[in-house]
Image (cartoon, helix red, strand yellow):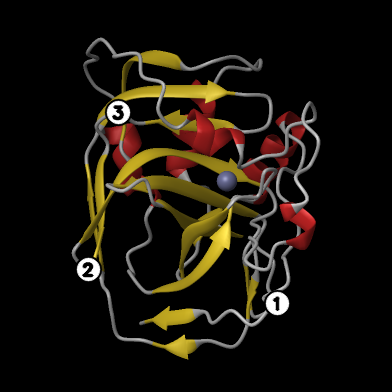
Amino acid sequence: MSPIASTLSRSIRLRVLGVGFTLWAACVASAAAAESPLCRLGHRQSPIDITATAKASAPALTFAYRAEPLRLANDGHTVRVRFAHGGELLVGQERYRLQQFHFHTPGGDRIAGEEFPMAAHLLHKGRSGQLLAVVVLFRLGAENPTLAALWTLSPRRADGDHAVAGAMADARALLPSSRAYYRYEGSLTASPCSEGVTWLVLKQPLELSAAQLAHWRTRFEDNIRPPQPLHGRTVLEIP
Ligand SMILES: [Zn+2]
């Protein structure tokens, strides 16, 4: 049983919290807004294809996430789970609070040319407002019980955030066992494509089944742009 499924338990009333909207609004394209020129002209854009890397030994990742009552949305582009007290990611000594996670098809960031059918983006904010995104990639394989539990609970129609009575959200359920990762400096993946976002791509993919992917595709259009030019950026590889 997945941690999310196993933590389906007693519910507590949720606080209403607006954090994360700005982050989210810029992770998928909004049809309403004109695209920022930075999306075409920026030299530090996301996602990318990770090919050549520079090996680095640190900093290590420590995921200090916590479970909290589930609050999720179908926003018309994806399924999103927001956190008010979801814990932190430590990158060495730097602390980043978890804000929300959501899903993309296809995966966006590629590794050595491999395109993944899906990715989860876990978005964080540092104390100085620094944005940091963790990417968990998915390959086709076994059914993923965490995704199954989440998607079953997500509203069929596009709507705002919903508290789900009796359900808990725990982002640890979306982490692979390995903490190895790639790191690069990038941007929001949709307009305004603001740069200065740190991207950590976990090297070990998770799995979802072909049936799960097919089901997702009946609900959502593809929602991420193709890899962007590196323009001389170095991708660090932390084993
Ligand atoms: Zn995203």
Write down the residue under mark 1: 113
Which residue is more in the foreground, 121 or 172? 121
Write down the residue under mark 3: 84
Which residue is more in the foreground, 2 or 161? 161
Kind of residue at badge 2: Gly
Judged by depth in the image, the label closer to the viewer, 3 or 1, is 3
Q: Quadrant of the N terminus?
A: top left
Which residue is more in the foreground, 219 or 185? 185
Kind of residue at badge 1: Gly
Element type where label 3 sits in the image: loop
Question: Which of the two discs, 1 and 2, labels the residue nearer the N terminus?
Answer: 2
Give coordinates of residue 52: x percent, y percent. 59, 88
Kind of residue at badge 3: Ala
From the viewer's perspective, is 154 left or right of 55?
Answer: right
| Residue 1 makes an appearance in the image | no
Q: Quadrant of the C terminus?
A: bottom left
Q: Residue at x 52, y 79 (%)?
A: 235
